[in-house]
Image (spheres, helix red, strand yellow):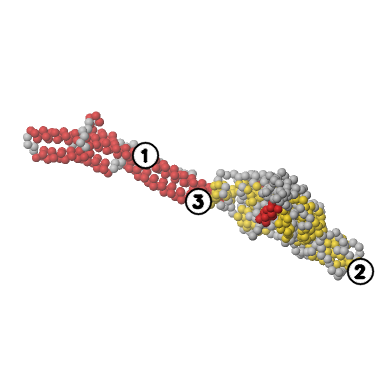
Amino acid sequence: MYTKHSILSFGVALVAVLGAAGAGPFLASAQNPASLYVGPASGTFTVGSTFTVSLYVNTGENDVNALDAQLEYPADKLQVVSPTAGKSIINIWVSQPSYDNRKGRLRFQGAIPTPGINTNAGLISQVVFRVTSIGTAILRFTDGSRVLLNDGRGTDILGQTTSGVYHLALPPPAGPTVTSPTHPDQERWYNTNTVTFEWGGEQAEGYSYILSGDPVDYPDDITEGTKNSQTYKSLPDGAHYFHVKALKGGVWGGVTHFVTRVDTQPPADFPIEIAPATRTTSLRPSIVFDTTDSLSGVDHFEVRLVSLSPKTANAEESGEQSFFIEAASPYVPSLDYGSYDVIVRAFDKAGNYTQKTQRLEIVTYVLDIVSGAGVKIRSNIVVPWTWIFVVLGLLVVVATYIARVLWHRHHRLHTILSSGNVLSPDVQKQLDELKALKAKYDQGGKALLALLALGLTLGALVAGPSVRAAISEGVPAELSPPIVELIPPEITNKDILYVGGTSDVPGSAVRIYLQSLTSGETLRQETTAEKNGKWFYTFPTFLTSGKYLIWTQGQIGNLESPPSPQFALTVSPTAIQLGASRLSYELIYLVAALVLALALLVQVWLAFRYQNAIRAKREKMLAETRRAEESIRRGFALLRRDLEAEFTAVQNMKASGELPAEEKEREQKILKDMETVKRYIGEEVWELEKDI
């Protein structure tokens, strides 16, 4: 299957082959870009008529040998009668000129033998169009169009295209003069679907008329009477054509065509995008909006920023941004910190509008608190409140458990040190044996007691186990109620309520009634309509959460309007009222999270403190144990000296003669006790005198 590019390449190759015999060197490069344009570039043509458009190429002083001209036109307003290929600079048509009246497309694809053509007004072809509807038609070259340089490579040198813009109108009146008091301008769109036509001129025997969707329709030859006006109700959206002719002297005259345009539908729904985010620290956010309208088209946008914070709401009351202003997207206002409702209205050319509202919050923060969501750590990471409370709660529980375990250890060590029982069971057993032997051998007892007293002296420790944590142009006969056009789609009890709209009588008083469905209390406020009938009011205080009804009533002098339709309003509870103070749930969540974080820090601090206290007390107990063991060894050394002295005395007695039975028993006990002492102090000889 061949694409358009492959066909064009084939044509270029064909031209190169045909001109290869006598061709000179190819141009290396283009000096100036080529252009495509149409003629005439503009004009006014009537429905039913035809006109011819010529397509031209300006090669920019270059030699070109192929081109591909592709065009688009509005198929609902123009139809191609025939594209002519008779007179043209194209010698070889890769494909015959083609058109598609359903899609509104034209295409001319051809080539010129080498050396090509160099011209500033080369005629590609002529196209005959028939006008089928009124409006504006644009004939433009598409991006697929190309002009190829004769350089052997087929370089595209198309740099510019010029479109044709044509005004299409109804034929001039040939019959009665037609006007419309409801839709006077035939070029405009109107948002009312009841249309009245009036016609007149010379006296006639009768008129025949018809309303249709054909711009050049013709009524029949049956008279509708002599009346010179007709009203049509509930017309569908679109363009409607009224055709009328008059009967004079038994002869029907020419037909007058009159168009009326009806568009009762507003532009399509659209989002409001705010950069960098709808909750931001930027005082100059970018507000982006766009939409379409299928009939009359989008005419313009209007923007209004309504403050929901008392400080900026007061500034608004003084005149700052107190009305809608026409704006284009993106709209970048200069704002102060606070909450705003960004209201954008998209108007079509019939005056219908679609209104959208987006909440904008400008804050200053280190960690952003997102209402009802959680804490924003980065520009796109939001940690929910539930996760925050669960994680902090678990950390507090774990830290509390660790701190309690450490406190119990600390308390046990403190009790041991306070009672003086710092020795391990083994050391205590040694001490008991030393005391038993000391009781048997009294010599050296005073020195032994002195060493023991020195080794077992304990210092006083002070521990604080408890920690505290804190942690007027005349009066009308009847007055219509003011129309409510502005009211927030959603509101909380930490936002300021606003309401706005229009009144039929500029300068009239506008009463605003707000009734609580909970308490039944009705609040009445009053404002004044401006010169253009617009009115706007911001309530001075916050509302309590609940359901409300809101309506308006107009007054001028002693004349009062009926009440307007009532609007239901729900104020969501996102703040707690304590007397004159108002605490938002965000603040409560933040305080709760901070309390948990503080409790966590306290428990961690307690854990570190108890750990340090346990380490100090363990070191003290180890020191005391080492002193006790050293004292015991020295005590046993002194005891060994006394035992050796006793043993020497027994040996001297034994050398002098036979020992009595009690002395032999004493000798055996001394030997046994010396073996016990040897287990603790070894076989080395101590210089006890120096130590003592």
Looking at the rendered image, the quarter that the N terminus falls into is bottom right
The residue lying toward the viewer, choosing from 690 and 39, is 39
Instruction: Choose top left, top right, bottom left or bottom right for residue 521.
Output: bottom right
Say which residue label 2 marks. 250
The residue lying toward the viewer, choosing from 218 and 115, is 115
Mark closest to the chain's N terminus, 3 or 1: 3
x 26%, y 43%: residue: 426
Q: Does dot 2 land on a helix, a strand or a loop?
A: loop
- How far apart are labels 3 and 1 at the CA level? 36 Å
Q: Does dot 3 land on a helix, a strand or a loop?
A: helix
Mark closest to the chain's N terminus, 2 or 1: 2
Label 2: few (<14), some (14–19) or many (≥20) C-alpha neighbours in 10 Å: few
x then y, percent, for residue 486: 69, 54
x 66%, y 50%: residue: 288
Vertical order, 606 against 349 (above or below): above
- How far apart are labels 2 and 1 at the CA level? 128 Å
The residue lying toward the viewer, choosing from 27 and 324, is 27
Q: Which mark is residue 129?
A: none
Vertical order, 15 against 464 (above or below): below
Looking at the rendered image, the quarter that the C terminus falls into is top left
x 22%, y 30%: residue: 689
Callout 1 amino acid: Ala
Mark closest to the chain's N terminus, 2 or 3: 2
x then y, percent, for residue 186: 81, 58
Label 1: few (<14), some (14–19) or many (≥20) C-alpha neighbours in 10 Å: few
x 25%, y 31%: residue: 691
Q: Which mark is residue 389?
A: 3
